[in-house]
Each structure stands twice: as C-alpha cells, then as structure tokens.
Image (cartoon, helix red, strand yellow):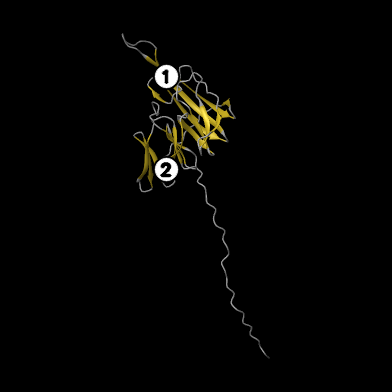
Amino acid sequence: MLTLLLVLPALAMEPPEVAAAEPVAVDMPALRLATGALVEPTLGLVLLSIPQGGIDAVDLSTGQPRWHRDDATVAIAAAGGELGVWDGREQSRDGLHLLILDAHDGSTISTCPAVALPAWASTLPGDHTVAWTQVQGQLTDGDLLISWQASHWFHGGARTRPGQRPLAQASEAGTARCHAGTLIPVEGEISAVPVVTIPGGQIQVIDGRVMVLDEAGAVQWTRELAKLDAAGE
C-alpha cells in the first residue's frame, strides 16, 4: 500500500481587525461653586462674574476667556450647550431679567419675560446690606427653571427700649419656568449642586478667587471673582 503524505504550507494567521474606539465625551452637569462661578465640564468652561462687570466664559484648562457678555451678571444654569444667565446690572421694577445663551459663543438664544418679585425686593445680585436676592436654576430640554428668594430688612415692629430703631425682616420665595419665551409658574425648589472635583483636578473658590488645581495640587490658573454672594451663603 502506498501512503501519500500531503504537506500543506503553513497559513499565516492575522489578528482580526478591531475597530478604533470612539472617543467618549465627558458629559457632566454644570456645577455651581459660588454665586458668580459656574463650571460647565462638558464644554470645559467656567462662567465667571468678573469685578469689571459682565460674565467671562473662561477655558477650564488655560484660564483664558473664550467670550464675554456685558449684559449678563450671573450664570445660573448650563446644560446641552445652553446657558441661563441673570441680567442684574440695575434695579428693575419689572423683576428678574433672564437670558438663555449659546454656551459656545455667548450669543443670545432667547429672552425670558421678567420674573415678578415683591416691590421691596432687590433685582441686583449680591448682598446690598438691607436687601438681597438669591437665584438658582436648571436648564432642562431648553427650559430655564429658576428658584428665587428675596429678603429685605426694614425699620418696624415694637420698640423694646427708648431710642431703639427696631428692624424686621421680610422674606419671600418663588419659582418659575421660562419656556419658549413665556413664563410658566412651577412649584417646589430648585437646588444647586456644590462640588470641587473636576476631571484631572479640582476647582474651588478661596477668598474671592477661583482656583483650578491639577491632580498633584499645583495651581493651573486663578481668577478674581466679583463679590456677589448674598448674606448667609
């Protein structure tokens, strides 16, 4: 019997092709550090109320401004590439003036009708000794939801001793939703989320300055913040 031995050449086995991994976008909610300091990690921005007036959109990595708005005083919410801001440049009898901006370049997307406040309330951000107003917000599906609290000290009440000028406090709060240029009343409170941790390091407010530190604790950049925190914050 004749046996044939068939020798086949070795086949080169190539590894299967693996598709390159798609880059994963950092998708985190905007984070409020203090009144006038809002971090938008998704776009790598910090929205700062600056002492000279207006808002600077500052690059989170470099500390350099990307854009500026003179008619915005405080950034109160950011999501989905949009930014809710409070225009508190002057006292207004109409109430709170709010805008929705494009967070990429600061252009105006929509203007909200004024949110009515009590006649004695301040429409200016910050502590003004006898009157102050705090505003917090969220952006959800293009709607700007805000929660406000206004307080005011005034002379009144029963005198407890001769010559004394007693003080009493008025305080009122409310909420509203800005939807497609119209205001819709809502119930409940909207809370801000304080945080200091960001991808690759930390951001914090110390003695009126915003500081960004890397993972080793080294300061990457620092900027002065406008003094807007109201009493009690």
**Which element type, helix, strand or loop, lies under badge 2?**
strand
Q: Quadrant of the C terminus?
A: top left
Label 2 to label 1, Cα distance in Å?
Answer: 35 Å
Residue 217: mark:
none
Residue 152: mark:
1
Extreme residue in the top direction: 162
189 lies left or right of 153: right
Q: Quadrant of the N terminus?
A: bottom right
The x and y percentages for residue 158 are 38, 10
50 lies left or right of 102: left
8 lies left or right of 123: right
Of residues 160 and 47, the one nearer the viewer is 47
Q: In the picture, residue 182 is in which quadrant?
A: top right
The x and y percentages for residue 142 are 57, 34
**Which element type, helix, strand or loop, lies under badge 1?**
strand
Q: Earlier in the sequence, mark 2 or mark 1?
A: 1
The x and y percentages for residue 67 are 46, 37
Of residues 144 and 160, the one nearer the viewer is 144
Mark 2, Cα crowd under 10 Å, few <14 / some 14-19 / many 20+, is some
Mark 1, Cα crowd under 10 Å, few <14 / some 14-19 / many 20+, is some
The x and y percentages for residue 29 are 50, 40
Residue holding disc 2? 197
Query: Residue at point 44% right, 33% down?
Result: 55
* Amino acid, disc 1: His
Extreme residue in the bottom direction: 1
* Amino acid, disc 2: Thr
Q: Give the vertical position of 153 relative to 85 (above or below).
A: above
Q: Give the vertical position of 62 relative to 7 (above or below).
A: above
Query: Residue at point 50% right, 28% down?
Result: 147
